[in-house]
Amino acid sequence: MSKTSYLLDTSAVMVFLEDEEGAQRVETLLRNEEVFLPFLALLETYYITLQEQPEDVADKRYALLKQLPATILWSLDEPSLLTAGRLKATYHVSLADALIAAMAIRNKAVLVHKDPEIAALSGIVQMETLPFKKQI
């Protein structure tokens, strides 16, 4: 195990759950590294799944996420809130992306994602980008 810790964005969680390209990398991180899972990733995964699949699938995914070998970040402290506000105002990312990035910064974690909108924050937060879906 390295001293680097990682924080999974919702996009990384969905890659893992849907076994997309990059899922093996997420699994390796979960098995071998310190991983943080922000509450927003649980929330977004739950509602996205509810929009696309039956409620029992969303419930099972939520339960699975809570069982992963990751530390769930259930709250947001004031320094993270202020950092998120600055990121949102300056880089025009979504509120969820600003909050997740602020949590990564606060926890000194590498933000793992495959969200092109988060790329605007690449100079602000350490990132690892998973492969994007190939265009057909």
Image (spheres, helix red, strand yellow):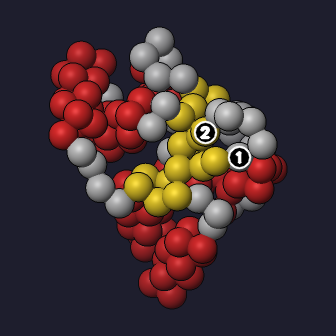
> Is the residue 118 above or below the residue 26 in the image?
above
The count of marks equals 2
Q: Nearer the viewer, residue 99 or 116?
A: 99
Residue at (32% x, 29% y) in the render? 93
Q: Going by the image, does 17 lie left or right of 96?
A: right
- Can see residue 20? no
Measure how far apart labels 1 and 2 are at the Cα level.
6 Å
Residue 69 image point, x, y percent: 65, 63
> Is the residue 33 above or below the residue 129 in the image?
below
Disc 1 element: loop
Residue at (70% x, 54% y) in the render? 30
Residue 135 image point, x, y percent: 70, 34
Amino acid type, mark 2: Ser
Q: Alpha-carbon neighbours of circle 2 within 10 Å: few (<14), some, or many (≥20)?
A: some
Disc 2 element: strand
Q: Which residue is mark 1?
A: 33
Q: Alpha-carbon neighbours of circle 1 within 10 Å: few (<14), some, or many (≥20)?
A: some
Per the rendering, the mark at residue 52 is none
Residue 83, picture quadrant: top left
Residue at (61% x, 39% y) in the render? 5
**Image quarter in which the C terminus is found:** top right
Residue at (48% x, 68% y) in the render? 49
Q: Going by the image, does 70 lie left or right of 22?
A: left
Q: Which residue is mark 2?
A: 5
- Residues marked 1 and 2 touching at CB (< 8 Å): yes
Earlier-in-chain disc, 1 versus 2:
2
